[in-house]
Amino acid sequence: YQGKRGAAGIVVYSGDGAGHPHQWLVIQAELRHALEREELILHYQPKVALPGGEVCGVEALVRWQHPQRGLLPPGEFLPAAEHSGLIVPLTEWVLRRALADQVGWAATGKEWTLSVNVSPRNLEVPGFPEFVEELLVASGIPPHRLILEITETALAGDTDEVVRAITELGRYGIGISVDDFGTGYTSLSHLRGLPITEIKIDRAFVADVARDQQSQAIVRSVIELAHGLGSRATAEGVETPEVRRWLAEAGCDEAQGYLFGRPVPWPQISVNEQTAHVE
Ligand code: C2E
Ligand code: CA
Ligand code: CA
Ligand code: CA
C-alpha cells in the first residue's frame, strides 16, 4: 500500500481498490470527513511479559469504519493520511481516544501501558510534546504508562525537530519505542542519545525464529542491543508456542502476536487476557 512518486511528481496510490490518483484524492476528502464524523475506531492488541505471559500493556491500532466499504485496515488509508498531512490530526485523535479508554482500565485497577503509533510528521509539529503532556495531566495517567512507537525508518530520516521532540517526551517520562526494528536500515548512531525505552523486533525476523539460524542470530543481537541501551526488547508477530518459547529462552522481555490475542475493540480485551495465559 505504498504511495509512489511518478515522473511528474504526482503521487500514485497502489493500494487495493485505489488504483489511480483520483481515488487517492477521494480517500483524502473522505478521511477528512471521517475525522469530523468520528468514523475512526481503535482496536487494541495485548502485549505480554515473557516468560509468564501476563498482559502488561496494549497497543492501539486504528481502523476506519467506512460507511460504504466496511472496516478498513490502516494500510488502506494511512498512506493517504501521511501524504496529505491528515496524519497529524489523526494521531491527535488516536491519542485522545486511547487515553480516554485508558482512564477506564485504570479505574478497574489495570496497570497496563498504552502504546500509540506516532508519525514523524507529528514530531515535527511545534508543541507536540506539550500537547501530549497536557493530555496526560488531564487524564491523570502517569507518563511512564504511555509509550509512543516511532518506526525505525522514521528515526533514520530524523531532523533536529524530531530529535528535540523525542528528547522532550522522554524527559517527561513517556516511553519511546523503536518500531519495526531491523527493517529500516538505520545506522545505529541514530539511536545514540535518544531516550529509548523499548525496541520492537519486526515480525519478519520473529516469524522464522524457531527454525532459521540467520533470524535467530539477528533476533539475539537485537535483544542484546536493546539491553545494552537499557531498553526492553519486544517481539511482534508471535504466532506459535515454539516461537514464544524460543524468545523467552533468548531473554526477550515482551511479546505481541496472534498467539496472545488479535487486535479487538477494547471491551473484549479482558476476554483476551485469559487466553494470553494459555500456552
Ligand atoms: P505495526 O505498528 O507494526 O502494528 C502491528 C501490525 O501487525 C498490526 O496490523 C497488527 O494487527 C498486526 N499483527 C499483530 N500480531 C500479528 C501476528 O501475530 N501476525 C500477523 N501476521 N500480524 C500481526 P494493522 O493493525 O493492520 O496495522 C498496520 C500498521 O499500521 C501498524 O503496524 C502501524 O505501523 C500502522 N498503524 C496502525 N495504527 C496506527 C495509528 O494509530 N497511527 C499510525 N501512525 N500508524 C498506525
Ligand atoms: Ca506499532
Ligand atoms: Ca511494529
Ligand atoms: Ca510491523
Image (cartoon, grey):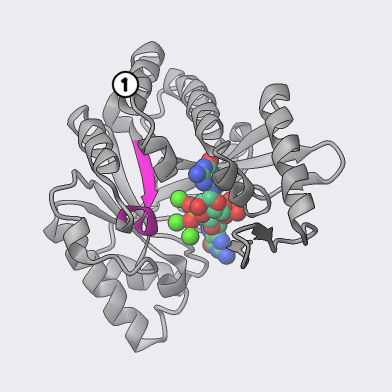
Label 1 C-beta lies within 8 Å of the nearest ligand 1 atom: no
**Residue interval drawn in magenta:** 147-155
- Residue that appears at 22% across and 31% down: 168
Residue 143 point in image, percent of width and height: 29, 26
Q: Is 153 inside the magenta-drawn segment?
A: yes
Q: Nearer the viewer, residue 74 or 36?
A: 36
In which quadrant is the N terminus drawn? bottom right
Q: Is 8 inside the magenta-drawn segment?
A: no
- Residue that appears at 44% across and 60% down: 236
Residue bearing the label numbered 1? 130
In the structure shown, which secondary structural element does the residue marked by tag 1 occupy? helix
50 relative to 270, above or below: below
- Residue that appears at 80% across and 58% down: 17
Residue 71 point in image, percent of width and height: 75, 44
Q: Residue furthest right?
A: 68
Drawn side of residue 85 relative to residue 254, left or right: right
Q: Mark 1 is on which residue type? A: Glu
Residue 272 point in image, percent of width and height: 56, 45
Whether residue 138 appears in this view of the structure is yes
